[in-house]
């Protein structure tokens, strides 16, 4: 295991409960203002997150990286603890690819319908649903055995 002083704890929480709770040597997240790489002893930070992939390097296996589909939320880092409060989040190993592909198809259909009816609000909601579905599809390709 890596040196204890170079370890941080990562917690990902959604309204449905705890999704992830492990130690890490590095996390990479996409904030609204750009990518963040956080290692132990980083300066405290709070950042709003994009719909994107969260990557976590684990100390127990340097070649192992966990991937989590995060759908918005906030990241807070302080005292070597990364806390992510997300609207929703799903580990790569838990993603149902067929369901994600179906959600992508439905979102694309809703976007087309909203364009035809000039329904800007519905189109925007469908674009968010599409981004979430595409994120889940992309993250599902990082499943570890």
Image (tube, grey):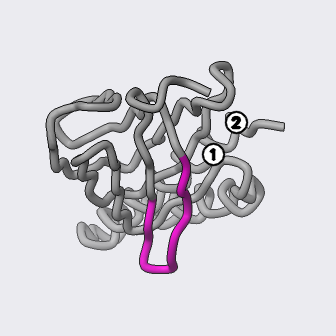
Looking at the rendered structure, which numbered label has been put on residue 141?
2
The residue sitting at 58% across, 50% down in the picture is 136
Q: Are marks 1 and 2 in contact (CB under 8 Å)?
A: yes
What is the secondary structure assignment of the residue under circle 2? loop
Q: Residue furthest right?
A: 145
Which class describes the residues within 10 Å of circle 2: few (<14), some (14-19), or many (20+)?
A: few
The residue sitting at 58% across, 30% down in the picture is 59
Whether residue 119 sits left or right of residue 28 in the image: it is left
The residue sitting at 70% across, 36% down in the picture is 141
Between 56 and 9, which is closer to the camera in this rendering?
Answer: 9
Which class describes the residues within 10 Å of circle 1: few (<14), some (14-19), or many (20+)?
A: many
Label 1 to label 2: alpha-carbon separation: 7 Å
Q: Which residue is mark 1?
A: 137
Q: Position of residue 74 (x, y in %)?
A: 26, 57
| Residue 15 covered by magenta stretch | yes
What is the secondary structure assignment of the residue under circle 1? helix
Quick check: can you spot residue 134? no
Q: Position of residue 19 (x, y in %)?
A: 55, 64
Q: Position of residue 130 (x, y in %)?
A: 48, 55
Looking at the rendered structure, which numbered label has been put on residue 96?
none
| Quadrant into which the N terminus falls | top right
| Quadrant into which the C terminus falls | top right
Picture quarter containing residue 101? bottom right
The residue sitting at 73% across, 39% down in the picture is 143
| Residue 119 covered by magenta stretch | no
Per the rendered image, the range of residues in magenta is: 12-22
Quick check: can you spot residue 23? yes
């Amino acid at each position: 295991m890596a040196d204890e002083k170079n370890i941080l704890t990562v917690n990902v929480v959604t309204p449905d409960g705890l999704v992830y709770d492990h130690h890490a040597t590095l996390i990479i997240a996409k904030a609204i203002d750009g990518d963040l790489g956080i290692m132990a002893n980083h300066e405290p930070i709070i950042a709003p997150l994009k719909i994107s992939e969260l990557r976590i390097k684990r100390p127990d296996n340097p070649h192992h990286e966990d991937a989590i589909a995060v759908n918005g939320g906030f990241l807070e880092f302080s005292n070597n603890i990364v806390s992510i409060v997300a609207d929703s989040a799903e580990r790569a190993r838990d993603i149902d690819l067929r369901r994600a592909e179906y959600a992508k198809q439905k979102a694309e259909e809703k976007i087309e319908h909203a364009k035809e009816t000039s329904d800007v609000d519905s189109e925007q909601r469908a674009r968010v649903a599409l981004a979430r579905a595409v994120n889940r599809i992309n993250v599902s390709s990082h499943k570890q055995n």
